[in-house]
Image (cartoon, helix red, strand yellow):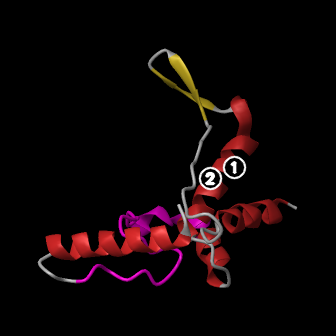
Amino acid sequence: MSKNEYAHFAEQLDADIAERNGGAPPPQDDGPDHHRNAPVPDPACLYGLIGDVARAGSENTEANPYAIALNCISYLSAAIGRGAYSYIGNSRHHARIFGLHVGRTGIGRKGDAASLIHRLDM
């Protein structure tokens, strides 16, 4: 899809949304974390030490604090390894967290969130 085709498609989508909303214009995209269908995370996700690290890491960067928190939790679960587990029923559940970052290519700052946690480990 060429840039002109994309721009035409985006304009048509905005017009369709405005029509469905009774003529109100669609919300404007004013940054890498604002998207038409982006979920709004609960601030309670940034609790405790991990929340402190996430907020501090996002102050002077464009990284999303929730992405930093997810990376921190995933990295810590990998560092803990398979030695720690909890029984649920008759099966062991290890402290392994698998996270997925979804963002627009080039401006999503997914790598910034991951590199901060790797830098803390040095």
Marks 2,1: beta carbons within 8 A: yes
Give the residue displayed 57% in from the left and 70% down from the top.
Answer: 65
- The location of residue 78, given as percent across then percent down, is 71, 42
> Which picture quadrant has residue 96?
top right
Q: Main secondary structure of the magenta part?
A: loop
Asked if residue 98 lies left or right of residue 37, the reply is right
Decide whether residue 44 is among the magenta residues.
Answer: yes
Asked if residue 114 lies left or right of residue 44, the reply is right
- Name the residue that disc number 2 marks: 73
Q: How far apart are marks 2 and 1 (CA)?
A: 5 Å
Tag 2: Cα neighbours inside 10 Å, few (<14), some, or many (≥20)?
some
Q: Tag 1: residue type? A: Leu
Q: Give the range drawn in magenta.
A: 25-51
How many numbered circles are shown?
Answer: 2
Residue at the far left: name it.
22
- The location of residue 56, given as percent across then percent down, is 64, 78
Closer-to-camera residue (95/69): 69
Give the residue displayed 47% in from the left and 68% down from the top.
Answer: 6
Asked if residue 94 lies left or right of residue 88, the reply is right
Decide whether residue 95 is among the magenta residues.
Answer: no
- The location of residue 34, given as percent across then percent down, is 44, 75
Closer-to-camera residue (105/4): 4
> Which picture quadrant has residue 85?
top right
Give the residue displayed 30% in from the left and 74% down from the top.
Answer: 14
- Name the residue that disc number 1 marks: 76
Asked if residue 17 lies left or right of residue 64, the reply is left
Q: Tag 2: residue type? A: Ile
